[in-house]
Image (cartoon, grey):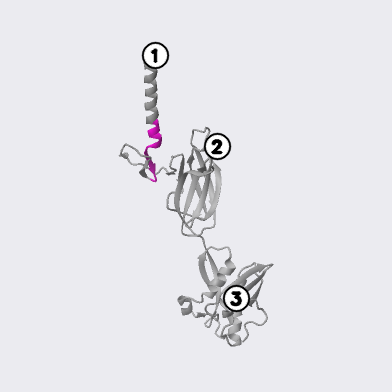
Amino acid sequence: MKYFIFTIVILMLVALVFFVIAKGIDEDGWICVDGAWQKHGNPSAVAPIEGCSYSGIASESGNIVVMEPKANSVVEETFQVSGSARVFENQLNYKLLDDTGKIIDSGNVMANANEPSEFGEFEFKIDFVSPGGNGILEVFDYSAKDGSEIDKATIPVKFGQKQIVLKAFFANNKLDPEVSCVEVFPVERTINYRIDVARASIEELLKGTTAKEMESSYSTSINKDVVINSLSLDNGVARIDFNKQLEANIGGSCRVSLIRAQIEKTLLQFDTIQKVIISIDGRVEDILQP
């Protein structure tokens, strides 16, 4: 009987040792993150001597590993996310945030593990409108207990930004030596992509001419400090309202005609606009008088 009890105690001690060792391996050790050894928990051993190749960015537990994108890489407005995960029911979640913490995109995806204890691969695509600057991609699990975000892999990214070319129209006494007062000519401006391109084009117009454009004889008849109050598009008609600075201290029919021509031509460059109605603080009929 004593021998039996002794044997049971020994087996229990052996099991406990193996449990502690396994626990230490699972929670305390060194993991290879982005090509460098990093502590996982509180390892008793020193970092491995041999180098490590890039093995992704892991969550705290190591149950979620993101291989792409790499930390601080530039992501365009469509990019792939891939990695592996061992999560409940194979479902994991993601958020893409800008540098203010605003959520740009979010969703959930599935890993393809065959068994709950196995890692499964995942891959998905994010389409977004780039705000520029820096951001964070988070891939994580939700707690079954309280719904909190757990086991999160955090990847810092840099947002690439698509650019577009639009036109602003200005007078040019070399291209219009007769000074017709109605002829205006385009200059190209490259800006970061925006949905409201019509408004963006007028904003470029209101900036006036650059030094290089002035060297090429481009000029504007529009006052400084003019502000767009509103711009709406409906059935091919653009209605644009400015503050009173648009008509402050202007004189002569030629200048008035050029102001109208600059605004109208800049908006009419877009196929969706066939007519332009200009107003000042809501007034339409009695504005831009010589």
Label 1 sits on a secondary structure element that is helix
Give the residue number, with chain letter if any, for mark 1. Answer: 4
Q: Quadrant of residue 230?
A: bottom right
Question: Is residue 205 visible to the viewer in this orientation of the structure?
Answer: yes
Please state the horizontal and vertical placement of residue 239, each as a whole percent of the image: 65, 72
- Left or right of residue 15: residue 273: right
Q: Quadrant of residue 289?
A: bottom right
Between 71 and 144, the one lying in front of the other is: 144
Q: Is residue 25 magenta?
A: yes
Q: State the CA–CA distance, disc 1 to disc 3.
A: 96 Å
Please state the horizontal and vertical placement of residue 267, each as a whole percent of the image: 61, 72
Q: State the CA–CA distance, disc 2 to disc 1.
A: 43 Å
Question: Is residue 181 visible to the viewer in this orientation of the structure?
Answer: no
Which residue corresponds to the image point at 48% horizontal and 50% vertical from the top-left?
137
Q: Residue furthest front?
A: 2
Give the residue number, with chain letter if any, for mark 3. Answer: 242
Q: Which residues are magenta?
A: 22-34
What type is the residue that disc 1 sits on? Phe
Which residue corresponds to the image point at 51% horizontal and 70% vertical from the top-left?
189
Q: Residues within 10 Å of mark 3 (few under 14, many from 20)?
A: some
Q: Which mark is residue 37?
A: none
* Quarter of the figure with the C terminus: bottom right
Q: Quadrant of residue 275?
A: bottom right
Are dots 2 and 1 in contact, CB under 8 Å? no
Q: Which mark is residue 89?
A: 2
Q: State the CA–CA distance, disc 2 to disc 3.
A: 57 Å
